[in-house]
Amino acid sequence: MKSVPLKAYPRTLSRRGGAKRLRAAGRVPAIIYGRQAKPQNLEVNAKELEDLIHHSASENVLVDLSVESDARPKRLALVQEIQHHPLEGDMLHVDFHEVAENEKVVVHVPLETTGEAAGVKTGGGVLEHILFKLKVRCLPKDLPEQIIVDVSHLELGKAVHLGDIKAPAGVEIIGDKKIPVVSVALPRAEEEEAAATATEAVAAGDVEMIKEKKEEGEEGAAPAKGEKGAAKPGEKAPAKGAEKGAEKGAAKVPEKGAAAAPEKAAVKAAGTKPVEKKK
């Protein structure tokens, strides 16, 4: 990647109020840090920075930063991060990472695709981006603005993995080689329909199994509610012999002296006393 010149100034206003006044004056607060020097607060021209980013393929830009009144005339740095306003999109803050020409850096590079996948063209599939950025390690001069992957050979259900991507010269792609990056999948509606069909088939099989088990268990089923001999909840069903015994013992045993009651009543009516039997 070729470095681009950019001018910066030491920041004179700090804190929240100072940052607002800087933005109102057409400048963006910034900071530069790295191994070679301590972090330093800077400010850059907002219009120059916007033009620089606009003409780049990504926000990964290598700059020759010249800081006004600095001991070093130029400082090689990467645009590490740009903070934007969530609604208006204006630049709020910029981070510059100072690097050396012979020092390898680790950067996330945008991933772009080229060509029309065969699975999309003839199979009605959908091209899905699983990763939008790739982590790479290289020297600043070898840093690519983006990595392009040809997907024209991709069939339906196939994917390009991290290990399948050929890195530019001097660039190392970091990460698990088995991770999918781009794939061709079925349209969402077809996937949902296939999943619903599979679920219905499984549910139908479960219903048949439950019905078979129920039919097998009907022979030894307990008597219905209200039938003779039905056990109440929490009680054991009575044995067959117990029912017959209950019927035999259903008649009450006459109380002692109950048989003599009619005889006494008859004697009383006749006015005579009953003759006592000799022992």
Image (spheres, rainbow, N blue to C red):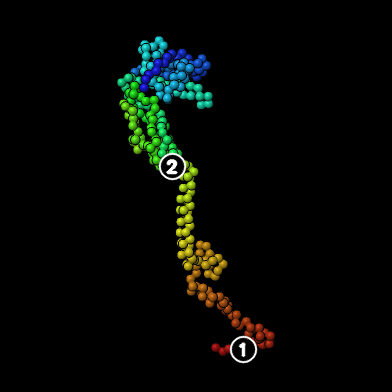
Give x and y (percent) for residue 97.
Answer: 38, 21
Q: Which residue corresponds to the image point at 51% horizontal and 14% vertical from the top-left?
A: 25
Q: Which residue corresponds to the image point at 54% horizontal and 66% vertical from the top-left?
A: 224
Q: Nearer the viewer, residue 121 or 132?
A: 121
Q: Which of 161 and 208 is in front in this view?
A: 161
Q: Farthest residue toward the top?
A: 69
Give x and y (percent) for residue 221.
Answer: 49, 66
Amino acid identity at mark 1:
Val
Q: How crowded is mark 2: few (under 14 residues within 10 Å), some or many (20 or more)?
A: some
Say whether disc 1 or disc 2 marks the residue closer to the N-terminus: 2
Q: Can residue 258 be seen in this view?
A: yes
Alpha carbon distance from label 1 to label 2: 121 Å
Residue assigned mark 1: 275
Q: Quadrant of residue 176?
A: top left
Q: In which quarter of the image is residue 151?
A: top left
Residue assigned mark 2: 123
Q: Which residue corresponds to the image point at 42% horizontal and 25% vertical from the top-left?
A: 57
Give x and y (percent) for residue 180.
Answer: 38, 37
